[in-house]
Image (tube, grey):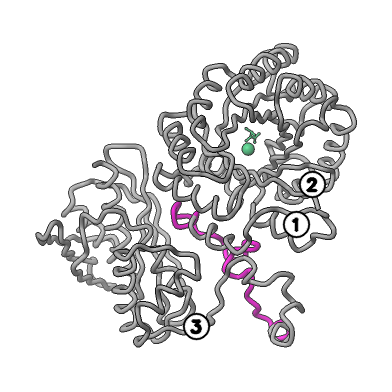
Amino acid sequence: MRKITIFDTTLRDGEQAPGYSMNIAEKVEMARQLEALGVDVMEAGFAASSPEDFESIRAIAKNIKKATVCSLSRLVREDITRSYEAVKDAAYPRIHVFIATSDIHIMHKLKTTREDILSKVKELVAYAKSLCKDIEFSAEDASRSDWDYLVNIFEAAIDSGANVINVPDTVGYTTPDEMYALINYLKEHVKGIDRVDISVHCHNDLGLAVANTLAAVRAGAKQIECTINGIGERAGNAALEELVMAINTKKDYYNCETGIETRQLFKTSRLLSSITGVPLYPSKPIVGSNAFAHEAGIHQHGVINNPMTYEIMSPESIGIIQNRMVLGKHSGKHAIESRLNELGYELSPEEMERIFAEFKKLTDKKKTITEKDLIALAGAEKMSDIETYVLEGFTVQSGSDSSATSSIRLVKNGEVYMDAAIGSGPIDAAFKAIERITGLGNELVNYTIQSVTEGEDALGEVMVKLKRKDGEDTVTGHGLSTDIIEASIKAYVNGVNKILAFRS
Ligand code: KIV
Ligand code: ZN
């Protein structure tokens, strides 16, 4: 079976989409999870775009041992040098250069000629090759480029040293039939194409990114570019989890396989949502909360008799935990720890201590504690940075006839800080009281809440995105509780602590 190379660009194309920005520590954490997932190549950023991007790529390059780490670069000498500087310490470094090849981009964006682009490809791909042996070349807007011109461009890139040639559908304009035909045309006409890997990079503007990518696989593409949860510019990129599970469930049809550890898919998807604070819509294929939920009686009946009646893959195959083990008041620390280890969490003794304390508190509020709750507790622990402020207590009051008020008690270095505020609702009042204590002047740019498990005593998970008054970056704070106001306050305090950790 052919092995398909999975090129993940969550940290570059995905991260550049509005609402998905991540700081360096968050990107490194995501990169580690992508490595556990088994991606072959991870595009860690666009080194020349900002000093922060450069530093994140360097940090990822130093931390990742198994996957190729790549930096995107315009076909410009200084950008290429910068990309090389960022990835050179990686176990497997790659520079990914791109330039637009469609007439509309050449004339109206680059304001130059086809000949000029061709000569840049020859000169600068060769320059990139002189620095790094793994070079990917992308013809931006390939799907709207003249096919014979594309042939010339790819031949020049291959002659100058590119070992991967990428065919992006930059504006999500192509269809599966067209993509299939284009890849076949390139295979037939580009001299030297047998020596290199063909790659595709599809955007989802018409909702066809996954279908177009799979059509390219059928035509012989070796590498597919994708992102977790399909995030990316505008309508996003092809979703990694959808591509991988399509290839997996229809192995005989595609006659190929990937090296992805599919049981890490759900965890990776959730990690991205919790880092960015952007939840998934329930019917999102593969990883949405309804992806394996059967509502209609006739479906439920079928699934009870044989899951394959209505399920083409099992929830376990993507790492969704079924509530196999019910935990409660009497469960000991070892049982919790070994269950978390089985679920893929490696925890230090201090982390385990804190998780167990939270677990004990939860058993007072919740009748049955499931593995999903445990995962949420472990996730919240992993997300909690250096704690400067700790929530000690709070009160809120709200009703239809009066303004909402809240008082908050926080502890910092053993000292208690208290304040109160009025707000448009209890959560707003609580956030304002925290601001009065910390004096940071943060702006709340996003707030989401979702329940971790089902039932009336479900744990609620709140994510807040805060923007610092003195900087452009945002941080995501997380809070978990059976009480949504407490979860919200914890999330805000977690965000404040992250900002303080960032500063120091
Ligand atoms: O969409 C696109 O064309 C890209 C390239 C830089 C590969 O993201
Ligand atoms: Zn793209």
Q: Provide the residue designation for mark 3.
A: 325
Q: Please give left or right for residue 20 compared with residue 168 in the image.
A: left
Residue 146: quarter of image: top right
Q: Mark 1 falls on what kind of element?
A: helix
Furthest residue in direction left, as rendered: 415
| Span highlighted in magenta in the image | 272-299
Q: Provide the residue designation for mark 1.
A: 247
Residue 144: quarter of image: top right
Q: Which dot marks residue 463?
A: none
Circle 3: residue type: Met
Horizontal and vertical percent for residue 207? 70, 50
Q: Mark 2 falls on what kind of element?
A: helix
Indicate which quadrant contains ligand 2.
Answer: top right
Circle 2: residue type: Val
Horizontal and vertical percent for residue 288? 59, 64
Residue at 24%, 42% in the rendered image:
504
Q: Ligand 2 near label 3 (Cβ, under 8 Å)?
A: no
Q: Is residue 235 visible?
A: no
Residue 171: quarter of image: top right
Q: Main secondary structure of the magenta part?
A: loop
C-alpha span from label 1 to label 3 = 31 Å
Residue at 46%, 84% in the rendered image:
326
Sooner in the amino-acid sequence: mark 2 or mark 3: 2
Q: How many marks?
A: 3
Residue at 31%, 54% in the rendered image:
385
C-alpha span from label 2 to label 1 = 9 Å
The relative height of residue 254 versus residue 8 in the rendered view (above or below) is below
